[in-house]
Amino acid sequence: MKVLVIGSGAREHALCRSLSLDPDVTTLHCAPGNAGIAEVAELHQVDALDGKAVAALATELGAELVVVGPEAPLVAGVADAVREAGIPAFGPSREAAQLEGSKAFAKEVMAAAAVPTARSYVCTTPDEVDEALDAFGAPYVVKDDGLAAGKGVVVTDDLEQAKTHANACDRVVIEEFLDGPEVSLFAITDGETVLPLQPAQDFKRALDGDEGPNTGGMGAYSPLPWAEPKLVEEVLDTVLQPTVDELRRRGTPFSGLLYAGLAITSRGVRVIEFNARFGDPETQVVLARLKTPLAGVLLAAAQGTLADFPDLRWSNDAAVTVVIASHNYPGTPRTGDPIEGLDEVAAQDAPDAYVLHAGTKRDGDAIVSAGGRVLSVTARGADLARARERAYAAVDRIRLDGSQHRTDIAAKAAAGA
């Protein structure tokens, strides 16, 4: 099978790494990719938001499956354009991707499907914002209705900060705060059958102890030793399947990766948000544990044959990912700094630990930073403590001037706290 992956982050590097290890994948392409992806796939320049250009590239390459990684191309209808060209695409249609593209649309779908979620208001004026914030009280949860690259959500006790964020958005969702730990659960679906993956937990705040501003994610781990054994089954029955059924009922079937961000509250599981694609950095740890070859299951989803697909097989190992970010992330990150130590990780830590590239590019013989989140250092181990040890040992070999990373990824879970 010839496969084309669209995107350039660590999520796409994780996808490409897994696909490159799949014996059924004969040729692997990625557009636009990054310096790390170039080691496992042939790179091509394309505007990832231009559906016609992506479809033309896929046709030219003779691709038999196109995997659309990021949310923006999905919301722009890139998967539709690929399917219209007669090529199977893994990723929802433009209309179904509104589940991530619009928080208000997601709330509407959840209400119709009786999916448990936070009570909320959709606001478009300062007066509506004031009323909603007053109704819920602190801590305030304010979400930009549209895509914001993981940085459109503010959770704060500061009323003025909440108002400022809300009034900077054209349309905003203000909702009640959900207590309890957060869980990410992915599911692969063809619009009818829903195949849940293993749960993971990510770390949104920039600094240790969950301090600092929200980011796109500073690390993740899987499995969750503290989670109820029936969590996946419960979420499948109460969240994932009802949502997929409701979208199909509306005539906009969701085919691709449905990501449920969940809060395990004192009143039960509640949906915080839906995403329409693999999450970053959770994908890095989930795929590190997946033993089933990836291409076949993605193709089955794209072709509508998931009902006939065998159960997924998982490693008993744990996996931990630590994100190395640029100076000043998540503000205006510094770029262009050389990255050293990657060869040392490959020589001394592989295959138990490896580096997935996010914001990188090649500059002559050097690899330099080219974004906010630069690298995802991922490791496996017999348990979380061993996976953490290996991940941080690899992190310590990498040198990037001014870089930052959290030192507490999976620490509580590994300690049994």
Image: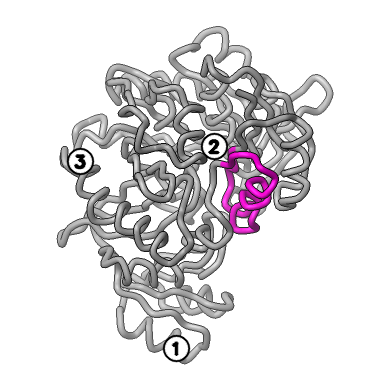
Residue located at (46% from left, 39% from top): 301
Q: Which residue is mark 2?
A: 11
352 in relation to 82, above or below: above
Circle 1: element type = helix
Question: Which residue matches tag 1?
Answer: 128
Instruction: Answer with the quarter of the image where residue 408 lies.
Output: top left
- In magenta, the rendered stretch is 67-89
- Frontmost residue, 407 versus 390: 390
- At mark 3, the secondary structure is loop
Q: Point out residue 149 in the picture as x, y percentages from the top left corner.
A: 57, 55
Eyeballing the image, is 232 above or below 146?
A: above
**Quick check: 385 left or right of 189?**
left
Q: Are marks 1 and 3 in contact (CB under 8 Å)?
A: no
Residue at position x 48%, y 43% in the image: 278
Q: Are marks 3 and 2 in contact (CB under 8 Å)?
A: no
- Residue position for label 3: 227
Is 41 situated left or right of 408 in this image? right
Within the magenta stretch, is there residue 68? yes
Whether pointer 2 and pointer 1 mark residues with C-beta atoms closer than 8 Å, the reply is no
